[in-house]
Amino acid sequence: MPTRTILKALIHQYFDLMDRVKELSAETSEHWQDLVAEVEAERKAEEQRAEQAVEQQQTGPAPASGESAASDSAQPHRHPSAPPEGAAPDRPAPEHREQM
């Protein structure tokens, strides 16, 4: 019967098409997973950079290559506008001012 031959050919084509769809689906899924993993890695790196920036703002800049962290902790951190240690302040603190 010719219709049987035609139907078998159509079924073969259907299976070929389904195989191709499965391949494309697997490739697309793989590419999608790669993109998601890449974006997650970028976000994690950005978060780490942001955390490092916050830590640097809180603790000050990292010691120079010749300095060690131990020498950094030996001296107290001073505000840049504070007078040098041992220097007299420009004016006395409010509790030391004379009242008029």
Image (tube, rainbow, N blue to C red):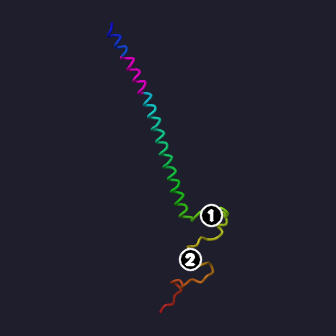
Q: CA distance from mark 1 to mark 2?
A: 21 Å
Q: Main secondary structure of the magenta part?
A: helix
Give the quadrant of the N terminus: top left
The residue at which mark 2 appears reads as 82
Residue 39 spot, x, y in % from top left? 47, 45
Q: Is residue 70 magenta?
A: no
Residue 8 spot, x, y in % from top left? 37, 13
Instruction: Examine the image and state in which quarter residue 12 appears.
Output: top left
Q: For the point 43% across and 24% down, which residue is it?
A: 19
Nearest to N terminus: mark 1 or mark 2: 1
Residue 27: mark: none
The residue at which mark 1 appears reads as 63
Give the secondary structure at mark 2.
loop
Looking at the picture, does residue 23 appear above or below residue 69? above
Left or right side of 23 for 66: right
Q: Magenta residues, as a range?
A: 10-21
User: Number of labelled discs?
Assistant: 2
Left or right side of 15 for 90: right
Out of 81 and 70, give the one closest to the viewer: 81
